[in-house]
Structure formats: C-alpha cells, structure tokens
Amino acid sequence: MAEAKENTTSKPTAQSAGAHEPAVTDRVHVWPYLVRNEFICSIIVMVILTVWSITIDAPLEESANPTQTPNPSKAPWYFLGLQEMLVYFDPWFAGVVLPSLIIVGLMIIPYVDINPKGNGYYTFRERPFAITMFLFGFFFMWISLIITGVFFRGPGWNLFWPWETWNPHLVIALTNVDLSAWGPLRWMGNPKIFGVEVIGFVLIAFYYSTAFVFYYLKRDISDAIRQLGPVRYGIVAFLFLTMMSLPIKVFLRLAFNIKNVWVTPWFNI
Amino acid sequence: MPNFNELKKRIVESQLWRSIFRHDYPDTPRNRVLQIMANVWLHLHPPKIRRHAIKIRFTWCMGGVTFLMFLVTVVTGVILMFYYRPVAEYAYADMKYLQYDVPFGMIMRNMHRWAAHGMVITVWLHMFRVFMTGSYKAPREFNWVVGVVLLTITLLLSFTGYLLPWDQLSIWAVTVGTNMARATPLLGSEGPFAQVVGVTPRYDARAFLLGGTLVGPPALLRFYVLHCIFLPILISLLMIVHFWRIRKDGGISGPL
C-alpha cells in the first residue's frame, strides 16, 4: 500500500478569490483515503452511541394526563430558545414571526453575503462582519437561550440557579409595565394626551430608520455598502435590527421592567 | 518476526488460498476508481477528491455523521414501529412493553432517541462548519438553502417523535410547542387580527395541526403519520438533492 501513495506535491494555499485558477490538480483517490476516514468515523460514532444507549435510558414519565399540568412545562430542549423568547415577546412574535425570520434569514444568507473571499477555507480576517453576526446569533443568542431554558428555568418559568431547590410557591411581584405606563413617561398619564401608545410606534420607526440614515451616510464612503446595493442592504439591515431587538428587549426587561414597547389593541411588541 | 513476510507469502501462494481467492487485489489507480464507480453505495462519491477535503479538521465529518444518525433512527425506528400502536389507549402501554418485555426493546428505544438528539446537534454543527468555511458561497448558494430546509425538517421530525411515548413529558412539551401556533397572525385564534379573519379555537392553525383543540388522540395519530411517513419521505428526497448538488456544484468546497 505504501508505494501507492499519491505523488502530488504542493498543498493548495488560501488565496483571494480574484485569482481564477480553475482546475484543482491536487486530488487524492476517494478509495482508500476518504472511505477509510468515513469508516473509522462511523465506527467511533456507533461505539459511542451504543455505549451511551446501554448506560443511559431514554426518559419515560407517567402516562399522559391532560388534567395535570406539570410546572414548569418545557418544550424539547432544542425549542427552549423559542420558549425563552416568549418571556420577552408576545407569542405571535416570539413563536411565529421570529422563528420564520430565523429560517428565512438563514436561507438568504448566501444571496446577501456577496463577499467572494473566504470561500472554502477558515478565515476571520477576510469576512469579519459575516462571522461576527453568525457567532453572535448562533452562540450568544440561540445556544445561550437554550442553556437558560434548560438549566435556569423552574416553576412559573422563574429563574433558578441549578443548585437552588425549586420552590413552586415562590412569589415574584409582577412589576413589569408597558412603556406607556413606565415611570418617566407617566406624566402624560390618563387621559392620554395624544394617544400615549404612539410613543412605541415612533420609537420602533426610529429604531428601523437608523438603517436608512446609516445607508445615506456611509454610501459614499463604504465600498461594501455600495456593492451591496439598496435591496440587499435593506434586507441585511432589517434582519440585523430585528435580531438585535431581542437583546434590547431582554435588557429593557431586566434593567427597567418594561414589558412592551408598543401596545395596540391587536398586538404588542 | 523476520519470517512474517515469508509466512504471508507461503499462505497467499498456497494451493488452498489461491483456490479460494484466485488472485491478489492489485492496488492500481484503475482499481481505486472502480471501487467507487462500480459500487452502488460508494458512487455517491467522486473517484477523486481534493486533498484538504479528507481532513477531519476541515469538515469535522459532521455532514456524514448527521447522515449516519439519520440511518440509525430509520433502522431503530422501523423496529420500534413493530411494537408501537399510535392509539391513546395503547401507546403508553406499548412503551412499557418495549422497555420491559421486548428483547432489546429498551436499547432500540434508547438508540433511537439519542441518535435523534445527536442528529439535532450534529446538523447544527454541520451548519456551523459550513458557515465558518464560507462554503455557502457561489456556486453552492442553493445547497445551503436545501440544507436549511433539512435542518428544519430534522427539528420537526424530532418534535413529532417527542409526542409518541404519550407520557407526561411528551404531551406537555407538545402542548407548549403547539400553543405558539395559536398565536399565528391571521390564522391563530389568539393571534393578531384573528377577529378580522374569523378563526376560532376549533378552526385555526393549531387545531389543524392537532386535529382538535388539545393534544389528544387525533394529535397522536397525526404526529405518528407525520413522523413515520410524511417527514421521512420529505427529508429523504431533499437529502438526495443535497448530496447530488454537492457533486454538481464542484464537490466539497475548497480554496479557489
């Protein structure tokens, strides 16, 4: 076998995508070099899975009983990120709109990331924005929300440390208020001066309009934004600002006990 | 030790050996290619591949491990289907039967469940790896889209399977999960603009999913059919597209 080793010489080096070198000459036979890896990898994974399955039993609780609700009722762990978002947003937003935006947003990544560099090799320096965004969304938000939901949520969906005993009778004052009833804005009071709820709409409109301001300020300076064009830029900005609305809402809730920013008869944000 | 090669030679050249195996396996480039091209399972692969692509530290083997996890759930799932009836009166009893009476029932159930959870993790890691290597960039944009759909179906498969044990854990987890459908704008009875459309708790997105207003026997049957027939067929079709597009888009990604 040893003499059959491929006699190719140079390894491919990472180069910028401007250079169009079509044919890759440095190839090895799939049999045995790849098939061997796959075979070993499968065996290792199967051994781990088998040992795991012998030692740890899948959970089976008491028979289903629709009249007895456990506290807390948790979704499967991979959906606890969504359940955790329910704390900060209404169900229509946290449970329907945000998950849809996550899926659609993931799908359109290839069409809005027009940076040709970093195709097929690990690099941070050549695409810092894309990688920072992905790491933030995937690790900081998705994974950390799941960890919070799995390990730190107890009865009443209250926060508990893992070493604390769950007290189902723990009384937590519900001090969260909507922005229109929040301390510094309460002077407008009742009767409402000009429909206090408008503040929320104005704030959200202002939040999203920062994207327009940023675009017109940076268009002439930044090559990246000019190449992106208004449509792709708009999509990226919308998804980015919507993603950031979650940590902002978490901050508003934890720091100021603000429940909703914009309250309407039909929906709250 | 010095006689090892000689011993091997004697065995290989013995009349008995040659009568069984006829001739040696010549490790020629032609034979290496034929091993892949002439094998119905292996011809998923190209005969040759870029050198960096066989490195574990480039691919983490995560796409392959995800596929392996899927195959494990298919095999163990079929075995579980022999013993499980998706009827509210029997489902939980069948779980107990599987655990205590069916030979190897417990380990089949454990492997099915842990492989399903493992698949959720490996599919995330696979997506993470593909993102970090920028492998979704042209010409592989559409395969990334297919991959996102596969990820979603993986989660749905896992979620529909979660209900089937019909214990407290499953019905309440599914209750929590499907309650969100009630809040769908326009289509959910408690969502924004529900009155405008006129949906009621009995006729809204959640009731359509559950076949009723709560997680009851019709929901169990629906989730069973989705879990065992509809979603596996869908994910298999899309996996075919996913693997085919890897080849058509120029094989595994690499530096240009």
Image (cartoon, coloured by chain):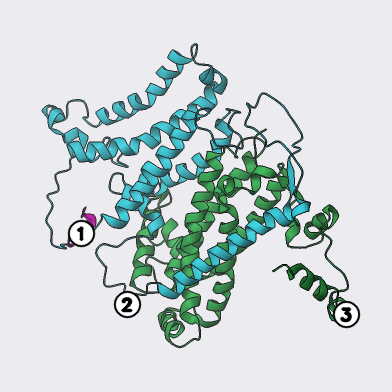
- Quadrant (top left/top right/bottom left/bottom right) for the C terminus of chain A: top left
Residue under the point 76% across and 38% down: A25
Magenta segment includes A4: no
**Residue B211 location (% of width, % of height):** 45, 66
Q: Which mark is residue B15?
A: 3
Residue under the point 41% across and 74% down: A55
Q: Which residue is mark 1?
A: A163
Element at badge 3? helix
Q: Earlier in the sequence, mark 1 or mark 2?
A: 2
Q: Are marks 1 and 3 on the same chain?
A: no
Element at badge 2? loop
Q: Tell me where residue B30 sits by quadrant.
A: bottom right
Q: Rate crowding at label 2 as few (under 14), some (14 to 19) or many (20 or more) other CA atoms within 10 Å.
A: few
Element at badge 1? loop
Q: Which residue is mark 2?
A: A62
Q: Is residue B43 above or below residue A129?
A: below
- B144 relative position to B101: left or right: right
Q: Which chain is green?
A: B
Q: What is the chain identity of the residue bearing mark 2?
A: A
Magenta range: A156-166
Q: Colour of chain A?
A: cyan
- Of the pair A141 and A170, the residue shown nearer to us: A141
- Of the pair A109 and A147, the residue shown nearer to us: A147
Magenta segment includes A158: yes
Q: What is the chain identity of the residue bearing mark 1?
A: A
Amino acid type shown at disc 1: Trp
Q: Are marks 1 and 2 on the same chain?
A: yes
Would you say the magenta stretch is mainly helix, strand or loop? loop
Q: Rate crowding at label 1 as few (under 14), some (14 to 19) or many (20 or more) other CA atoms within 10 Å.
A: few
- For marks 1 and 2, give the CA distance: 25 Å
